[in-house]
Image (spheres, helix red, strand yellow):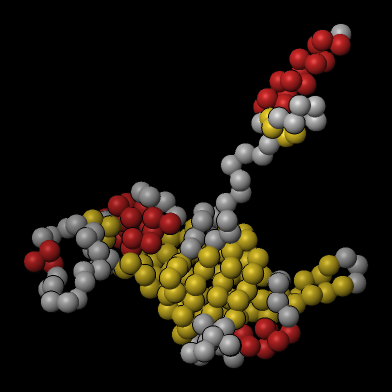
Amino acid sequence: MRLSFVPKHKAVIADIDIQSLKQGQTDVVPAVCLTLKMTLANSTLNLLDPTLMSFLFEKGLPAAAQQQVLDGVPVVSDLPQLTDAAVALGSLHWEEEQTGATLKIYEGVTGDRDITLSDCTVRKLKLDPREGGAVDWRLEVYTSDVDQDTIGALAVLKSLTRDIELTAAEPASQQRTIDDGKDDKKLTPEKALEKSVKNGAAKV
């Protein structure tokens, strides 16, 4: 799972759970878990799985009979109708977690009061598909990378709607290289293992 809600989206900060995290024998550091609620287009389901949108939504009746399209008002989705499977399943719980994310909460117009939470874990996703092509998202964002000032700024935001951005961590490099130490060539792990085996066989 690699969720990124960029550019910013409106979210309700439904709950703020101030916690403490024990480190070592005696040290305790603050932590916080935010519960966010957002209503987004069903195309955002592709962030979880490219087949999920077509599993839960379908075209249904012709667009003219299904919804009135007004000039200048974009259609929410070209798959606006819930499938029988979506109706039968109801709310969906997504158990996968995402680590290393960054959550930015916009406060005010100058940006001086914006809150940025780093090293976040995104977890406990709940999805409610809705007739018309929207999905209600509910998710938790947890981090222990906070200080007392940030905790105080977050505490007053419970039940309020704010613009937020959620950014996934950068993907790890595709493949590490290993220096063989002799001719300054870079070897992949597989080539390094192969060379090690060959050198061992030669010594025997």
Looking at this rendering, what residue extends furthest in the front direction?
Answer: 183
* The one of 27 and 71 positioned closer to us in this rendering: 71
In which quadrant is the C terminus drawn? top right
Q: Residue at x 39, y 66 (%)?
A: 128
Spot occupied by residue 169 in the image (x, y as percentages of width and height): 58, 59
Number of labels in the image equals: 0
* The one of 8 and 176 positioned closer to us in this rendering: 176
Spot occupied by residue 83 in the image (x, y as percentages of width and height): 26, 56
The quadrant where residue 11 appears: bottom left
Looking at this rendering, what residue extends furthest in the right direction?
Answer: 25
> Is 187 on the left-hand or right-hand side of 174?
right
Looking at this rendering, what residue extends furthest in the left direction?
Answer: 64
Q: Residue at x 49, y 76 (%)?
A: 164
Q: Residue at x 43, y 57 (%)?
A: 47
Q: Residue at x 66, y 76 (%)?
A: 32
* The one of 184 and 137 positioned closer to us in this rendering: 184
The quadrant where residue 145 appears: bottom right
* The one of 40 and 173 positioned closer to us in this rendering: 173
> Is 115 on the left-hand or right-hand side of 53?
right
**Is 166 placed above or below 57 here?**
below
**Is 144 placed above or below 180 here?**
below
Kindly tell me whether residue 3 is visible in this rendering: yes
Spot occupied by residue 60 in the image (x, y as percentages of width and height): 17, 58
Kindly tell me whether residue 91 is visible in this rendering: no
Spot occupied by residue 189 in the image (x, y as percentages of width and height): 69, 31
**Is 52 placed above or below 164 here?**
above
The quadrant where residue 187 appears: top right
